[in-house]
């Protein structure tokens, strides 16, 4: 069950959760790269952040759709 009380696989909630995870990865990548000073090119930093967003977004979405309805994982 999702935290908001919806049973099953609520697509809207899963998309929002995946977007939040992707946003955290995006800004975390930008922050980490700027704090560490590992990038001199802004385009490279933006590309790295977009890739991080995509990985986190689709991994979170895949995990959400792999869950069984009712929150019971496994057999």
Image: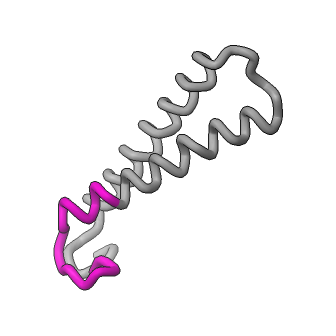
Residue at the spot x=25%, y=85% of the render?
5
Q: Is residue 11 magenta?
A: yes
User: Which quadrant would residue 7 be assigned to in this image?
Assistant: bottom left
Q: Which picture quadrant has residue 12? A: bottom left
> Magenta region's main secondary structure?
loop
Q: Is residue 18 magenta?
A: no
- Which residue corresponds to the image point at 18% horizontal and 60% vertical from the top-left? 11
Residue 72 visible somewhere in the drawing: no
Quarter-wise, where is residue 17 in the image? bottom left
Q: Residue at x 74, y 21 (%)?
A: 39
When the figure is inspected, residue 74 is found, relative to residue 61, above or below; the finding is below
Point 55% across, 33% down: residue: 49
Q: Residue 9: x and y, percent?
A: 19, 68
Q: Which residues are magenta?
A: 1-16
Residue 19, placed above or below residue 72: above
Whole-percent x, y for residue 34 in the image? 75, 33
- Indicate the quadrant containing the N terminus: top left, top right, bottom left or bottom right: bottom left
């Amino acid at each position: 069950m999702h935290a908001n009380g919806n049973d099953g696989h609520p697509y809207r909630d899963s998309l929002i959760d995946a977007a939040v995870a992707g946003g955290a990865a995006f800004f975390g990548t930008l922050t980490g790269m700027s704090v560490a000073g590992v990038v001199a090119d802004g385009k490279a930093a933006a590309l790295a952040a977009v890739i991080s967003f995509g990985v986190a977004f689709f991994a979170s979405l895949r995990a959400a759709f792999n869950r069984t309805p009712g929150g019971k994982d496994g057999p």
